């Protein structure tokens, strides 16, 4: 058994074979004694002083350090350990894809995480006088103080901060890094690679969000002003490990602004050399719900100062293209892949996923010239599956030494995960295989060929180019797209689905909710009206001030285009949607 398999077995000891149904008297005696010992230990733990808690916590980490540092799945294991520790000053650990994140130091000893600092204890003015030590320190009346959070799915998250964990256990607790001046919260940390493993080589890049009049709604309204910073934490970590930095205190570290001239900059990704990083940004930001971003490179100078350049700029209007394919619309992405620089073995090419019209597309970007291309992928046998169609969705999951791991799907096919082997010259050979029996990653996974697998639907999809009925305010009548998903039965009733946002897009990927409608015999028409992402900045801005008119007109034009194909019924139609699409659905008249 491999080391990875051994680690999984060791960590899941609680799921081993269950005891006999009728234990023997000796076994019952041992169980009773164990229960008494656990109760006594729990009582002793509850009555222990804070200093005792810290000492026991450090001893716990030292006992686990050998196992943690030799396990291939170390990041996963340490995350679980952090969640289980009762660390003073730390509340909720954030592991989402926006604020959250974790990054290992180049030496593999320190881990930086994002967490909500624990709020100071508070008590009501009307609460009875308490005798406990914690209650004496509580702020009277603080129980009624409003701490605004970031809204839906971020309940209780008010000021996410960066913390550093020493996996060797020599430093107790977590070291909190300070917020830069004028920053409301931070996230998306990543250690700078390189160096000889000393404390002087510990530098963390992260995203800092600027103060907002309202925090509410970050989960969907996430295009907030933000900048990228770099913190040199080596001195603070050395003091912390040496015991001169007070546990629980906020460390003093020098912080430099990497993108001070930009209103929006996020998703920092270090080059393997550590002398530059890639990011997504916008010079002036945008007031709309969503918008285009450029792909930028920030390069580190001799004086540790950064200069940035735009590698792939925003695209205002789509120029060129053909009757069957849109021109390149620019970068429409929320984040870069963690290993975006690994699209080539020498770090000269970046890989990312961006919306190209209605289609999530894998892009390759030359780091020197900014030239954008799409990979040429060949397969020995695609079995005629629609997830390999030209307009099917493809998303980069990871990269290493120039090879890509990509997930492909279509509206009628849940798709596959493939490895795209780099053959050179932008050409890739794709292959996928079932997980082998006995492989170390089989724990907790389903056999893709087994009964839990989701089969492709007996249907197909088409991407329609639709001419609008009315021009935009600046007189443009650029076409937009609608994705028509058809069931296997003939002459189906079509259900029109306008997306939410309003600045969003319905991708040509698998969505179980609408796949269910197709499986039940309905056709589904996803309308990416003007104002959707992935079609240029001018088309997106054209919807501002015209909601309820331009988008409604485009939905009706898309319905006529679908009926003109002769593939759906012309006498009946349905409509459904959520968020902004729900408003449009509610305004529909029979």
Image (cartoon, rainbow, N blue to C red):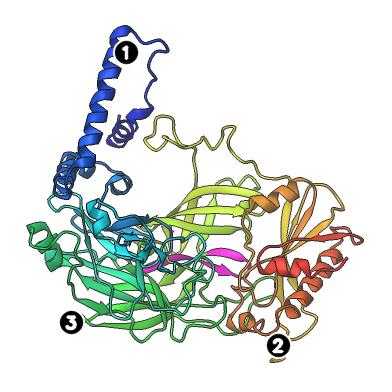
* Residue 347 part of the magenta segment: yes
Residue 527 seen in render:
no
Numbered badge on residue 476: 2
Residue at the spot 46% in from the left edge and 65% down from the top edge: 352
| In front: label 2 or label 1 | 1
Residue 555: quadrant of the picture: bottom right
Crowd class of label 2 (few under 14; some 14 to 19; many from 20; radius 10 Å):
few
Q: Residue furthest top?
A: 25
Q: Quadrant of the N terminus?
A: top left
Residue marked by disc 1 = 28
Q: Position of residue 4 (x, y in %)?
A: 31, 37
Read off the magenta span: 345-361
The mark that comes first in sequence, 2 or 3, is 3
554 relative position to 331: left or right: right
Crowd class of label 1 (few under 14; some 14 to 19; many from 20; radius 10 Å):
few
Crowd class of label 3 (few under 14; some 14 to 19; many from 20; radius 10 Å):
few
The mark that comes first in sequence, 2 or 1, is 1
Residue at the spot 43% in from the left edge and 58% down from the top edge: 96
463 relative position to 211: left or right: right
The mark that comes first in sequence, 1 or 3, is 1
Q: Is residue 35 above or below residue 178?
A: above
Q: Position of residue 335 (x, y in %)?
A: 44, 67
């Amino acid at each position: 058994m491999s080391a990875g398999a051994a680690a999984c077995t060791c960590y899941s000891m609680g799921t081993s074979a269950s005891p006999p149904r009728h234990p023997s008297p000796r076994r019952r005696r041992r169980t009773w004694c164990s229960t008494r010992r656990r109760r006594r230990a729990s009582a002793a733990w509850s009555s222990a002083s804070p200093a005792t808690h810290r000492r026991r916590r450090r001893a716990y980490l030292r006992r686990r350090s050998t196992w943690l540092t030799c396990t291939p799945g170390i990041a996963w294991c340490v995350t679980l350990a952090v969640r289980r520790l009762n660390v003073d000053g730390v509340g909720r650990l954030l592991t989402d894809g926006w604020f959250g994140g974790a990054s290992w130091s180049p030496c593999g000893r320190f881990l930086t995480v994002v967490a909500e600092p624990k709020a100071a204890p508070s008590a009501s003015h009307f609460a009875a006088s308490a005798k406990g030590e914690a209650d004496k320190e509580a702020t009277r009346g603080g129980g009624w103080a409003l701490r605004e959070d970031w809204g839906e799915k971020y309940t209780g998250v008010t000021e996410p901060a960066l913390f550093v964990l020493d996996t060797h256990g020599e430093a107790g607790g977590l070291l909190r890094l300070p917020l830069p001046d004028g920053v409301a919260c931070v996230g998306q940390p990543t250690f700078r690679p390189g160096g000889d493993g000393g404390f002087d080589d510990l530098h963390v890049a992260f995203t800092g969000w600027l103060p907002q009049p309202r925090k509410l709604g970050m989960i969907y309204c996430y295009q907030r002003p933000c900048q990228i910073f770099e913190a040199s934490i080596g001195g603070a970590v050395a003091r912390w490990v040496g015991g001169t930095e007070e546990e629980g205190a906020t460390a003093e570290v020098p912080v430099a602004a990497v993108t001070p001239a930009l209103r929006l900059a996020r998703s920092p990704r270090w080059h393997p050399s550590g002398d530059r990083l890639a990011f997504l940004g916008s010079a002036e930001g945008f007031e709309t719900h969503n918008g285009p971003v450029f792909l930028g490179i920030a390069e580190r100078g001799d004086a540790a100062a950064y200069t940035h350049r735009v590698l792939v700029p925003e695209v205002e209007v789509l120029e060129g293209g053909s009757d069957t394919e849109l021109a390149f619309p620019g970068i429409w992405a929320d984040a870069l892949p963690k290993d975006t620089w690994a699209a080539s073995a020498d770090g000269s090419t970046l890989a990312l996923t961006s919306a190209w019209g209605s289609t999530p597309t894998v892009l390759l970007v030359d780091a020197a010239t900014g030239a954008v291309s799409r990979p040429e992928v060949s397969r020995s046998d695609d079995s005629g599956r629609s997830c390999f169609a030209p307009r099917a969705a493809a998303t980069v999951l990871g990269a290493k030494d120039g090879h890509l791991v990509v997930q492909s799907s279509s509206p009628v096919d849940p798709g596959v995960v493939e490895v795209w082997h780099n053959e050179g010259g932008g050409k890739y050979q794709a292959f996928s295989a079932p997980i082998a029996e006995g492989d170390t990653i089989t724990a907790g996974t389903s056999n893709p060929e087994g009964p839990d697998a989701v089969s492709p639907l007996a249907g197909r999809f088409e991407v329609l180019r639709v001419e609008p009925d009315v021009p935009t305010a600046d007189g443009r009548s650029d076409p937009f797209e609608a994705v028509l998903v058809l069931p296997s039965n003939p002459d189906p009733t079509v259900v029109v689905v306008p997306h939410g946002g309003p600045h969003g897009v319905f991708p040509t990927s698998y969505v179980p909710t609408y796949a269910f409608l197709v499986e039940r015999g309905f056709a589904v028409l996803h309308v990416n009206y003007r104002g959707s992402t992935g079609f240029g900045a001018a088309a997106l801005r054209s919807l501002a001030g015209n909601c309820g008119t331009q988008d409604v007109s485009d939905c009706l034009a898309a319905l006529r285009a679908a009926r003109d194909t002769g593939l759906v019924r012309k006498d009946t139609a349905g409509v459904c949607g959520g968020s902004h699409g729900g408003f449009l659905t509610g305004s529909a008249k029979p």
